[in-house]
Image (cartoon, helix red, strand yellow):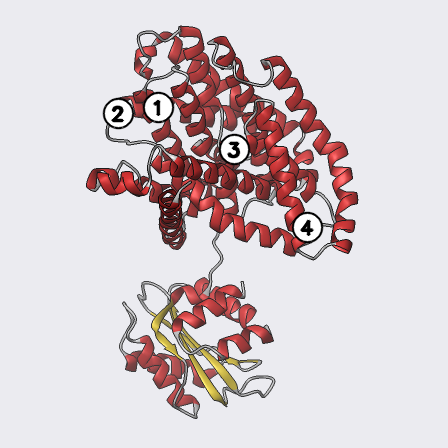
Amino acid sequence: MNHYDITILLLGLGVLLGVARIFGEIFKRMNQPAVIGEILAGVLLGPTVLGRIAPDAQAWLFPQAGNAAIALQGFTTIAITLFLLVAGLEVDISSVLRQGRASVLISVLGMVVPFGVGFAAAWFVPEWLGATDGAEPLPFSLFIGTALAISALPVIAKTLLDLKLYRSDFGMLIISVAVIDDIAGWMLFAVILGMIGKGAGAAFSVPTTIAATLAFAALMLTVGRWLLDRALPRLQAYTTWPGGVLGFTVAGGTICAAFTEWIGVHAIFGAFLFGVALGDSGHLRDKTRHTLENFISFIFAPVFFASIGLRVDFFSHFDPLLAGFVIVIASVGKLVGCGVAGRLAGMGTRESLALGVGMNARGAMEIILALLALSAGLIGEKTFVALVVMAIATSVVAGSLMEMLLQRKRTVRFFDFLAPAAFLPALGGEDRETALRELAAALAKSPGAPSAETVFSEVWKREQLVATGMGHGVAVPHARIPGLQAPLVAVGLARGGIDFEAPDGELATIIVMILTAKESTQMQLELLSDIGGTLQDHAVRTGVLRCKNYVELLASLKSAG
């Protein structure tokens, strides 16, 4: 690579990561999985949007050929490989094994039903799926069936992590089913490539690839687990911590990824299995897991998910009827297959539907499969675009639909309702009444807030009934206002301390004023609980008292968890 190639590569990576993180944060604030924003960031930067507005700039920043393009493709491959390594570390094998019959049953029906639906549609109405004139019926039908049967392990893992469901039994069930489905799907695809003579470049024959994959998985989950469990204490004892373990983990994951790529299965399965084997060891420290997860999930993974949008122009070959048909048959097949299997496995109706929705996410795996099929001449560009649209659409809705079906209650954090103007780093008053007037005036500046006099009057009335000092230097004056649309929070720091009659006798240095709707008692209780739980830690309170502005306060509270 020359000077120009390196410049383009670094600039493209920086822009891709920056925009992906921004959109990821935006979607997180909208209570959506960050992966949705990361994929949409790539769509905006790709030929679909930026390529239409400024085609020369888009082609210059993200070239489709040349050294920079090859390097970016290599980086995204490493990114998704490392992300699956981290996902593997989070898998609790005992939880997966406990699924037993359930995971096998759901895997079988979750593949057979959508595969049958896709195969039948491609066989009887191939023109509805954009089959080219020269397409061979059997390979084309097998491919469509396979494309509709697989799920996107990376997207599912990322969505579960975002929803904090990954380590639950429900999350482990979905992951175990997705692992089985994806391995089976890639094996089916290897058979299809062999049928059309496109697998000639593979290192092994199709039967050898299948046998080698099963043998490798069995070896990693038995002997590999035992060896890694024995090796970890020695690594931690004789290498620099945590660098030694981190380096060993990444090296082992990439070597295993290279092996599975060599035998004809996608590299991510090797990294995932290594992560599963290593993560099962009781010697692996939580800090090591968190260090790897934070670095890879917030740096490497967004680049990969954003790069999906760089691969295709959705306008040029977009057929809405074809895309709609693909989305319908793909979703119906997965929902019916997994939903029925979930019910047979003893799950409730909502859980079964949520399982089907989760497994319906196709994402990157679908796109990779479609790209290989396109390059092999198995499908045309319209079918490719339809499959990509289906992959993104099913990934976009998976998280929100799962959350809705499971009726999960999000944790209420008091600082989510704190506006910048409602943080006073240096209260001027030295007594309770003056401090409350200052906070009421700051709170009144928030959108939808009552007047400052109304706020103070209601809070002061409540304060006269029972003082709101919680102890440990924290006070939480509060009131319930009729018709308030959303909670309002103000935070003031009294460096010298103000007497709020706390049970422990300490003066309040951190004063949090909250307003909630009179009709919502539960919200007030949850906010009070969160404030008490967050600020009971001495280190957190010390960090808050050092804050000089809203940004520092938000950073301090979020970093405290």
Q: Residue furthest left?
A: 53
Do the numbered discs 3 and 4 sit on residues whose CB atoms are within 8 Å?
Answer: no
Residue, disc 1: 384
Mark 2 or 4, nearer chain start = 4
Mark 1 or 4, nearer chain start = 4
Query: Regarding mark 4 in the picture, which secondary structure is present there?
Result: helix
Image location (x, y in percent) of residue 468? 49, 80
Image location (x, y in percent) of residue 369? 45, 24
Q: Which mark is residue 245?
A: 4
Identify the residue at horizontal 45%, vertical 66% (top origin): 414
Marks 2, 4: nearer the viewer: 4
Mark 2 or 1, nearer chain start = 2
Marks 3, 4: nearer the viewer: 4
Mark 3 or 4, nearer chain start = 4
**Residues at marks 2 and 1, CA–CA distance in whole angstroms:** 9 Å
Residue, disc 3: 352
**Residues at marks 3 and 2, CA–CA distance in whole angstroms:** 35 Å
